[in-house]
Image (cartoon, rainbow, N blue to C red):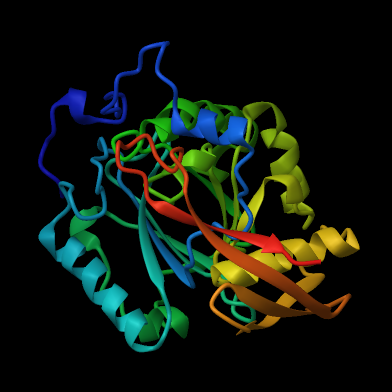
Amino acid sequence: MLPLIPCHLFITMPETKHNNSPSKTYCCEIARQDKVSMIGTAVQVDAWLLLEYPYAWKAHAVEDNLLPKTITKAFQRLTQEFDAVGLKLRVQLIKQAKSDLQAPRLFFADGRDNNLSLRTTCLSGYDAFPELSAEGLLNDNNKEFEDTAEEIYLICTNGQRDVCCSKVGRPLYSRLNETFGERIWQTTHLGGHRYAPNLLCLPSGYVYGFVDPNISVGLVRNHDQNSLDIEHLRGRSHYAPAKQAGEIYARLKHDITSREAIYCNTATETNRDHLTIQYGGSHSGEISLHKRMRLNPSTSCDENPKPSAEFLQVQ
C-alpha cells in the first residue's frame, strides 16, 4: 500500500513544466504548420505492461514515482527478460479521471502478429503486485489475468515530459472518455511529442497522431470496426519504423484501410538510405523507401531538438 499522499499530488495537480502563456508556440503546433510527416514514427514495441497509477506523473514517470521499489525493480527485470528473448517490452503508467486508489488495474498486451492479446487483472493494492516473468506473460501462465476482448485506447497526457501532451492530450481524453468510458486511459510518455495528441490502440499496437477531439470519436469507432484512419496513422508499434512506413504506403497505394488486410514481411536495406519493404495480404508487392534524417526544430518543446527520420516513397 502506498503511503498517504497530500491531495495536491493526485491527478488534479498541474503537470506542465513550461510557460503556458498564450504567446508560446508549441512543438505540435509548429509540426502541423510544417506538415511534418508522421509515417513510420510509432515507437517500436512488441509487448506492453500497463499499471494504473493515479498520482501526479513526473518527467520520467516509470522510474521516478512513489511505487514500492519492488515494483520498479520488477519493471527493470521484466524489460531485461524480454530483451533476452529478442522482444521489446514497454512499461507505461496509466490512469483515469476516477482511478481507484485501492484497486489498481494491471494490463499486459502482446502486439505480435500471431499473438495479439490483451489481459488484465485488478490488484488489491500495490503490495499485491504479482510475480511476473517474460515466460509466464508470453505463454499466458499468469492465472490472475483475464482476457479482454475490446481494444483499449491510451492518450499521452504527461505534461512534465512535454507540455504539448498535457495541453492537447487532456482535451482528447475528456472527449473520448465521455463516449467510451473506461476503455480510454491517460498514459505516460509514448514518444513523438510533436504529433500530439497521440493515441495508442492496444493490443493491435497502432498509434495515431494529431488526433483532434472533433474527429476522435469517429476514428475510434472506425478502429473498433477494423478500419484504420490512414491520414492520422503514425504506424504499428510491433513493426520497425521502415516496416511501419512500408505498411502505410502499401495501404495508400491500394486504398486499403482494413486492419488485417495488409502485413509486412521483410525489410531489405539496399544501401544506407534506401530500403525495400515486402508486403502481403489481400495485395502483395514491395515498397521502395528513401530514409532521410532531418533536424526539425519542432521535435519537442525542449530547447534541444533531436534529429528525426523521415521515410519517403520512391516511385
Residue 238 in the image: state x and y as whole percent.
55, 70
One can see residue 203 in this view: no
Q: Quadrant of residue 127?
A: bottom left
Residue 278 in the image: state x and y as whole percent.
74, 81
Residue 209 in the image: state x and y as whole percent.
59, 44
User: Which residue is pictured at 28% across the width and 41% down the height?
Assistant: 101
Q: Is residue 170 left or right of residue 224?
A: left
Q: Nearer the viewer, residue 174 or 145?
A: 174
- Above or below: residue 23 compared with residue 242: above
Q: Is residue 257 left or right of residue 171?
A: right
Which residue of the protein is positioned furthest toward the top in this rendering?
A: 22
- Above or below: residue 286 compared with residue 230: below
User: Which residue is pictured at 44% across the width and 65% down the height?
Assistant: 48
User: Which residue is pictured at 59% across the width and 66% down the height?
Assistant: 291
Quadrant the C terminus occupies: bottom right
Q: Nearer the viewer, residue 269 or 71?
A: 269
Q: Is residue 127 left or right of residue 132?
A: left
Residue 55 in the image: state x and y as whole percent.
25, 37
User: Which residue is pictured at 25% across the width and 63% down the height?
Assistant: 129
One can see residue 64 in this view: yes
Q: Quadrant of residue 107?
A: bottom left
Q: Nearer the viewer, residue 315 or 135?
A: 315
- Count of marks, rendered view: 0
Q: Quadrant of residue 281?
A: bottom right
Q: Nearer the viewer, residue 116 or 212?
A: 212
- Above or below: residue 57 compared with residue 105: above
